[in-house]
Amino acid sequence: MADLLWADFVNEDGNHMSKRGVSFAAGPDIAAKFMHLNNLQLIVRSHEMKEEGYELQKGGRVVTVFSAPNYCDQSGNKGAFINFTAPDLKPVYTQFIASVILSLCANHVLATSKQTSDGICISIYDVLTIELYQFYIPC
């Protein structure tokens, strides 16, 4: 189960060692095979920071979405989220930046991050995602 949860996806075909030191990194060919076997059209994942808030793997069948802008108050990355609308359920990506959200939410959200005992940095944006989406400003 850990391999499935922590696997990363890369743009080079084949299986690779993960840059995290756990699990593996799968290329577009591995993703396509997995999707075919499980009758999937898209894999959406979200546990890896992306500079633009989201990133499509080569071939467009795997997307990583990261909703915490300026991760750990130091990364300078954008945040993003996806909307799927009927009837075709085509994904629509929306990016946003932290500074705009902070100025809009200053009276409601204390934007801080903390280091937990297991070394994972958690941003308040991850905890208050629903409230923040009400205030997002597209990039």
Image: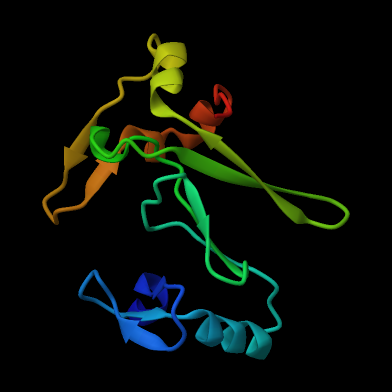
Point out the residue furthest to the top here.
Answer: 107
Residue at horizontal 46 percent and vertical 73 percent from the top:
11
Q: Position of residue 113 (x, y in %)?
A: 23, 34
In this rendering, the answer to whether 64 lies above or below 96 is: below
Q: Position of residue 15 (x, y in %)?
A: 39, 87
Residue at horizontal 31 percent and vertical 40 percent from the top:
71
The way the protein has been coloured in the rendering is rainbow
Q: Is residue 17 left or right of residue 42?
A: left
Q: Position of residue 59 (x, y in %)?
A: 61, 72
Q: Is residue 58 left or right of residue 18?
A: right
Residue at horizontal 24 percent and vertical 76 percent from the top:
22
In this rendering, the answer to whether 59 lies above or below 110 is: below
In this rendering, the answer to whether 23 lies above or below 139 is: below
Q: Position of residue 49 (x, y in %)?
A: 36, 51
Residue at horizontal 51 percent and vertical 86 percent from the top:
30
Point out the residue furthest to the right here.
Answer: 87
State which quadrant residue 68 falls in: top left
Q: Is residue 69 left or right of residue 117?
A: right
State which quadrant residue 14 falls in: bottom left
Q: Is residue 71 left or right of residue 82?
A: left
Q: How many marks?
A: 0
The N terminus lies in which quarter of the figure? Answer: bottom left
The C terminus lies in which quarter of the figure? Answer: top right
